[in-house]
Image (cartoon, rainbow, N blue to C red):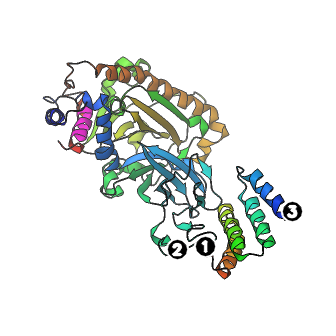
Amino acid sequence: MLDHDTLARDLVAVRQPVGQAHGLPSSLYTTPEALALERQHIFHNGWACIGFAKDVAEQGDAHPIDFLGAPLLMVRDKSDNVTVFENVCRHRGMILVEQPRKFGGVIRCPYHSWCYSLDGRLRATPHVGGPGINVHEAVDPTTTGLTPVRSAVWMDMVFVNISGTAAPFDDWLAPLTDMWADFAGKPVYHGGADSSFTLRLNCNWKLAVENYCESYHLPWVHPGLNAYSRLEDHYHIEHSGAFSGQGTRVYDPKLSEAQSFPNFDGLPAKWDTSAEYVSLFPNVMLGIHRDHFFVIRLEPVSCEQTIEHVEIYYTSPEATGPDYADLRTLNAATWKSIFVEDIAVVEGMQRGRHAPHFDGGVFSAVMDSPTHLFHDWIASRLGA
Amino acid sequence: MQQLHHIDAELHRLHDTPDPQQHSQIHERAARLLPDPAEQRFHLTHAWVYALVHGEPTNIDRLETTLRQLDAL
């Protein structure tokens, strides 16, 4: 049970400077009411990632998505635009598309066969005026198309703002695109089936973000990673109100002695050895390197369950071809083993959130500031 | 009448199959067999919807022209 007065007091404590702050209260990790609150204030009122444009790779492809209970439909239309609609017929609210599929023509509602073109226009209302009469003055096709959801695509990720009230997408994303300006305009190419996997976590979605954005845990949880990328080789990445994470100055993966992925063209020398790992609030965790890019999209399933959708992208079509298949498989397996190492700690923290006297925890003012920045963002979005 | 029974049976058989082109063609055949304009409108409406689902512009245009002539669109 979420006590809103107590939550308000706790969130004030979260917003103190990192050295004095407490972490977010346990109720935000363990109660369905908290997820409902976050659904409105965080996921629907702001921008959030719902999927990937590669999932509607060809014209006519449609991909239904349950976004925290909101039925959405991602479509690639005949002009190659990726758009998002509410996945419901404007007539009786029937779900239109149950499974990913391709449409040669219109999208037909399975209930009364109202039809919509791929750009959302209402195309047919059979028998709406009686048997065999397919128009009626009460139903205006120009105002009865599919309900569009504000959306944008960046680096193949599809973002939506359900409420329609968030800042313009480019403005929202500008702090990150400015920081990663070296990669601006460089297309990314998904590695294919060998470059996709999911992990199911028994924890609240926020714990995945918190774990991802700090390097403090690396020597303890990822000893293999620490062998070449030590704690002191990392630096914090912090942009209040937008993202936080960490970078390394010694990126040198050596997946194979014989082969390496092609790099993005024209990168400054910094990226020869640097890589950066950023949690873009609320629900994407990104890793950028000179030779590949990955995204972890977090799908909150319940207040104590989250799915990580991992997608790995490369720098050229060549790197996604058969000549690099073994290397891609190895790269995916390497990242998967690292992400799997995190599961025990995020699930342990979730169980810890049921301790009756845990107060959100205290932070290391030096090592935990990226996590505190995320907590501060959550608290601000929840109205503190 | 025999032909209409046959068409009905075909439509039942196809009910759960995703072949809009075939659905459209069968409804058009039914419309041609029926003298009553109301029944024609009914079947041509279904032919039109399945043509839209199939996405064949020529057939769609032709059926829409016919439906307009029948005051169905």
Residue at 52% across, 60% down? A81
Q: Which residue is mark 1?
A: A133
Residue at 51% across, 39% down? A311
Question: The numbered mark 3 sits on a residue in which chain?
Answer: B
Query: Would you call the spot at circle 1 few (<14 residues within 10 Å), some (14-19), or many (20 or more)?
Result: many
Quadrant, the C terminus of chain A = top left
**Residue B2 image label:** 3
Image location of residue A60, percent across then percent down: 60, 57
With respect to residue A54, does A60 lie above or below?
Answer: below
Is residue B48 shown to the viewer in this render?
A: yes
Residue flagged by tag 1: what amino acid is it?
A: Ile
With respect to residue A359, does A14 lie above or below?
Answer: below
Q: Which residue is mark 2?
A: A136
Query: Would you call the spot at circle 3 few (<14 residues within 10 Å), some (14-19), or many (20 or more)?
Result: few
Q: Are marks 1 and 2 in contact (CB under 8 Å)?
A: yes
**Residue B51 appears left or right of A341:** right
Residue flagged by tag 3: what amino acid is it?
A: Gln
Q: Do the residues at discs 3 and 2 belong to one chain?
A: no
Image location of residue B4, percent across then percent down: 81, 63
Image location of residue A37, percent across then percent down: 28, 41
Q: CA distance from mark 1 to mark 2?
A: 8 Å
